[in-house]
Image (cartoon, helix red, strand yellow):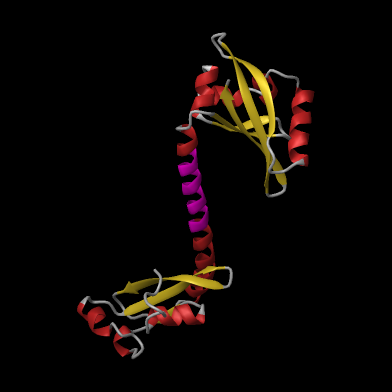
Amino acid sequence: REPRGKGPPPGLVRRAWLEGEPVWIEDLTKDKSFRRADEARKGGLRRAFAFPVKDGYRVVGVMEFFGREPLPPDSELLNSAIYIGKGLRQLLQRQEVEDELLRLRAVMDAAPDLFLLADPETMRFLYVNEMACKVQGLTREEHLQLTPWKVAGISREELTHLYDEAIAKPGEAITTELLSVSKDGRRGWFETQRRALRVGCRWLSVINSREI
């Protein structure tokens, strides 16, 4: 949890927050820095342990735990808490990213246009939205097995050229028209825009298509 107000509260949480290190209180009833000693005594709590959650070198929160018996500091647990505090923040960040991706996917699946994400290097689709699957008459799993050039109705060499053109102009849309043929033979013309997106050390192709 994060300290409230302008600064962290006094006692256990504040010490872990300011020192940036795990804090162990062997006996709460004898530690004057612990301001909640009366409440702890009523609840039958005797020892306390807290460690900071860090984002790099910056403390972003503090986790605290209590026990019913007074015990001396556990050096192994204190050392482990340092790594747990770092890993917990990374885990929370990954969860935040995953949640954001789920929200983005929900929005894209509800869109009337076709949205697809492809890897120019492996020539595979990474994501296709519901409308793209509907147009092709395929399930998402079936669509992901198709090669992008087959869906585009052009040769692999032609598609590679389009990818290279988009990568050479990051942020700009490369617009083409293509004839799509669905699983049941239905044909339709689509205006397709491809944009290059840099993710880490590789390029991805973001594809937006609508029937014309």
Q: Position of residue 74 (x, y in %)?
A: 45, 76
Q: How many marks?
A: 0
Q: Is residue 107 above or below residue 3?
A: above
Q: Closer to the camera, 19 or 73?
A: 19
Q: Residue furthest left?
A: 42
Q: Residue at x 50, y 21 (%)?
A: 134
Which of the pair 35/206 is nearer the observer? 206
Quarter in which the N terminus is drawn: bottom left
Can residue 108 be seen by looking at this rendering? yes
Quadrant of the rendered structure where residue 45 is?
bottom left
State the residue at coordinates (32%, 84%). Answer: 28
Can residue 73 be seen here? The reply is: no
Q: Is residue 9 magenta?
A: no
User: Magenta part of the protein: which range?
Assistant: 92-105
Q: Residue at x 50, y 25 (%)?
A: 131
In the depicted view, which residue is nearer to us: 107 or 79? 107
Instruction: Provide the major secondary structure of the magenta segment.
Output: helix
Q: Give the quarter of the image for residue 2.
A: bottom left
**Residue 149 lies in quadrant:** top right
- Residue 42: % across, % down: 20, 79
